Amino acid sequence: MLTPDPSLWQAHDQTTAAIAQHFYTYLQQPGVSAAQALQRAQIDLITGKQTVLPGKWAALVLVGNWL
C-alpha cells in the first residue's frame, strides 16, 4: 500500500478547480505565457469576492517551460 509523502502539501479540491479554470481561461488569451496565466489566476483568487487564502493553492507548482 502506498502512503502519501508527509512533506507534500495537500491542495484544497474546490480551490484547485477554481484556479485551474482561471488559469486555462487566461492561457487561451493570445500572448499570455503560462507563468502570466498562473499569476493572474492567483490574483483573481486573492482579490475576488470570496478571498481564498494562499495556503489553499500555494501547493500548486508550474512545471516546464514557463514562456
Image (cartoon, rainbow, N blue to C red):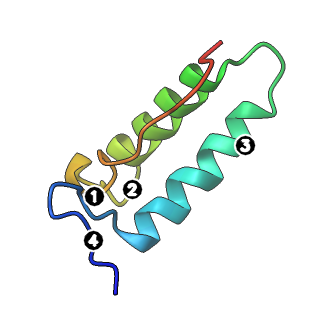
Alpha carbon separation for disc pair 2 and 1: 16 Å
Left-right relation of 54 to 49: left
Which element is circle 1 on? helix
Which element is circle 4 on? loop
The disc, 4 or 3, on the residue closer to the chain's N-terminal end is 4
Which element is circle 3 on? helix
What is the three-letter code of the residue carrying label 4? Pro
What is the three-letter code of the residue carrying label 3? Thr
Alpha carbon separation for disc pair 1 and 3: 20 Å
- What mark, if any, has residue 49 been given in the picture? 2
Looking at the image, which residue is at 80% across and 27% down? Answer: 29
User: Considering depth in this image, is 5 or 25 the residue closer to the camera?
Assistant: 5
Left-right relation of 58 to 33: left
Q: In this figure, which residue is indicated by the disc labeled 1?
A: 56
Query: Disc 2, disc 3: CB below 8 Å?
Result: no
The disc, 4 or 1, on the residue closer to the chain's N-terminal end is 4
Between circles 4 and 1, the one closer to the viewer is 4
Between circles 2 and 3, the one closer to the viewer is 3
The disc, 1 or 3, on the residue closer to the chain's N-terminal end is 3
Between circles 2 and 1, the one closer to the viewer is 1
What is the three-letter code of the residue carrying label 1? Lys
Which percent across, then down, holds residue 37? 60, 29
Alpha carbon separation for disc pair 4 and 1: 18 Å
Dot 3 alpha-carbon crowd within 10 angstroms: few under 14, some 14 to 19, many 20 or more = few
Between circles 2 and 4, the one closer to the viewer is 4
